[in-house]
Amino acid sequence: MRFSSMFGISTSRESGTTLVETLVALAILGTIAVIFLSGLATTSKAAFTVDEQATAESLAQSQMEWVQNASYSATGYSPAPIPTGKDYINYSATIMAESLHNPDDGIQKIAVTVRHSGETVITLQGYKVDR
């Protein structure tokens, strides 16, 4: 007598999928979906951060050019107007001018800080000379 017939085990192959096969397939598809969506979210966040950095860098550069073209001032400089438009909403700039020597000999260290929604994004430093 065969072992399989003694315990009532059927040896014939039945067609179709079992519950376990279906659950394994769903688990694999779910894992792939989670990996894909997390990658998509990371890419979206990275694109936003790069756009924010590029906008802030452009603003900082234009503010620095504004200071370089302004007349020398021992008391400091007011920032240039920030362009109006949806790309520049919630951006602000501050300009700090510090004389390198005391008494002022006409050389200043300039620091332009650009903030987005109150958080510092970039600080650009340069020098201005009284010519």
Image (cartoon, rainbow, N blue to C red):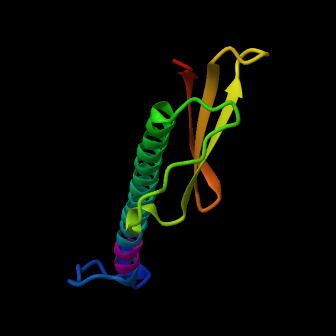
Please tell me which residue is depicted at 28% across the width and 82% down the height of the picture: 17
| Residue 65 % position (x, y) | 44, 36
Q: Which portion, as a residue range, is magenta? A: 22-28
Q: Is residue 31 above or below residue 11?
A: above
Front position in the image: 16 or 51 = 51
Q: Residue furthest right?
A: 102
Residue 129, above or below 53: above
Give the residue displayed 44% in from the left and 81% down from the top: 7
Compare residues 59 and 14 and report the one nearer the observer.
59
Question: Which residue is at the front of the view, 23 or 30?
Answer: 30
In the displayed structure, 103 sits above or below 98; it is above
The magenta stretch spans residue 58: no
- Can you see residue 15? yes
List x then y, in percent, for residue 124: 54, 34
In the picture, the quarter occupied by the N terminus is: bottom left
- Residue at the spot 20% in from the left edge and 83% down from the top edge: 15
Q: Quadrant of residue 84?
A: bottom left
Q: Position of residue 117 (x, y in %)?
A: 60, 62
Q: Quadrant of residue 57?
A: top left
Residue 1 shows in the view: no
Q: Is residue 53 left or right of residue 17?
A: right
Q: Quadrant of residue 32?
A: bottom left
Instruction: Identify the residue at image location x=41%, y=49%.
Output: 50
